[in-house]
């Protein structure tokens, strides 16, 4: 006969699975009307968070963190403080086909109707998030793991798979990937430390529209400055003009150690 603990565990898992299915159904219904609706990113984060509640081990999950960094803020979708490290998630709830490499500043989303959209390299984006967290928490960067999560509705046609401490997965493969990584890692934090780190980060979880709007303005201003900057945003070395198959472009002077490139703005 099952004991009380087993019954509670079974009921909890059943509730989580039912909740997950309800949210998935809601996303699917919304997608019937508009694939790029304003709140689609929030739904994607909901689904990713639900997956993380099934991760084994001592852990705390935090969402929508605004971390101060170099006079600005880094907006982070999800953070899982785990006994085996700190996992930082960037959620991309896109459909279509996804193309990108570790060196490209812009990745591409290609839709079945032929439309194409560019978005900032999520590996670079999450590297900035980790740098902000490491500085804020005074924790070595090697204790962090970068996790780029795409929707199960997309197809990852060309994305990097061999970057240390980074994994890129579709959401329906997320749990398997996480457990594979966790299985190979030794514990680094006890339960008290996991809770302590979560307590430090929890005040950074801001939901008000004013903070979100201010962050969006800061990001846009940073992008405008980057267009005219001659300093590599990855390593801080000078950018130099190089010539390739398709003409001139900006490249990092420390190549091949740093492979950052940027198109030259002819305007």
Image (tube, helix red, strand yellow):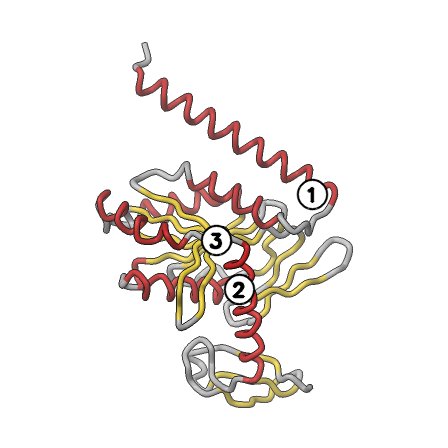
Label 1 neighbour load within 10 Å: few <14, some 14-19, many 20+: some
Mark 3 or mark 2: whose residue is earlier in sequence: 3
**For the C terminus, which image quadrant?**
bottom right
In the picture shown, does residue 8 fall above or below 214?
A: above
Q: Which residue is mark 1?
A: 31
Give how far across and how far down residue 149 sits, in percent. 51, 51
Determine the CA span between mark 1 and mark 3.
Answer: 21 Å
Residue at image coords 40%, 72%: 70
Residue at image coords 38%, 43%: 179
Q: Secondary structure at mark 3?
A: strand
Q: Secondary structure at mark 2?
A: helix
Q: Which residue is mark 2?
A: 214
**For the N terminus, which image quadrant?**
top left
Determine the CA span between mark 3 and mark 2.
Answer: 17 Å
Q: Which residue is mark 3?
A: 77
CB contact under 8 Å: marks 1 and 3: no
Give how far across and how far down residue 44 sits, in percent. 56, 46
CB contact under 8 Å: marks 1 and 2: no
């Amino acid at each position: 006969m099952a004991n009380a603990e087993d019954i509670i565990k079974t009921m909890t898992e059943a509730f989580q699975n039912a909740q997950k299915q309800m949210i998935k159904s809601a996303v699917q219904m919304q997608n019937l009307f508009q694939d790029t609706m304003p709140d689609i990113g929030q739904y994607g984060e909901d689904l990713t968070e639900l997956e993380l509640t099934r991760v084994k081990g001592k852990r705390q999950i935090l969402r929508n963190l605004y971390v101060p960094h170099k006079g600005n803020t880094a907006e982070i979708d999800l953070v899982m403080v785990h006994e085996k490290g700190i996992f930082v998630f960037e959620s991309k709830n896109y459909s279509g086909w996804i193309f990108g490499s570790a060196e490209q500043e812009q990745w591409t989303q290609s839709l079945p109707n032929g439309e194409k959209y560019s978005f900032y390299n999520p590996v670079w984006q999450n590297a900035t998030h980790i740098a902000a967290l490491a500085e804020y928490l005074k924790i070595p960067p090697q204790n962090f793991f970068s996790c780029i999560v795409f929707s199960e509705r997309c197809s990852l046609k060309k994305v990097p798979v061999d970057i240390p401490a980074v994994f890129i997965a579709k959401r329906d493969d997320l749990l398997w990937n996480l457990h594979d990584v966790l299985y190979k890692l030794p514990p680094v934090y006890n339960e008290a430390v996991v809770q302590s780190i979560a307590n430090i980060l929890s005040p950074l979880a801001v939901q008000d529209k004013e903070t979100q709007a201010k962050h969006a303005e800061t990001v846009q201003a940073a992008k405008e400055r980057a267009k005219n900057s001659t300093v590599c945003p990855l390593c801080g070395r000078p950018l130099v003009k190089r010539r390739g198959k398709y003409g001139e472009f900006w490249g990092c002077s420390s190549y091949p150690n740093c492979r950052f490139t940027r198109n030259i703005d002819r305007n």
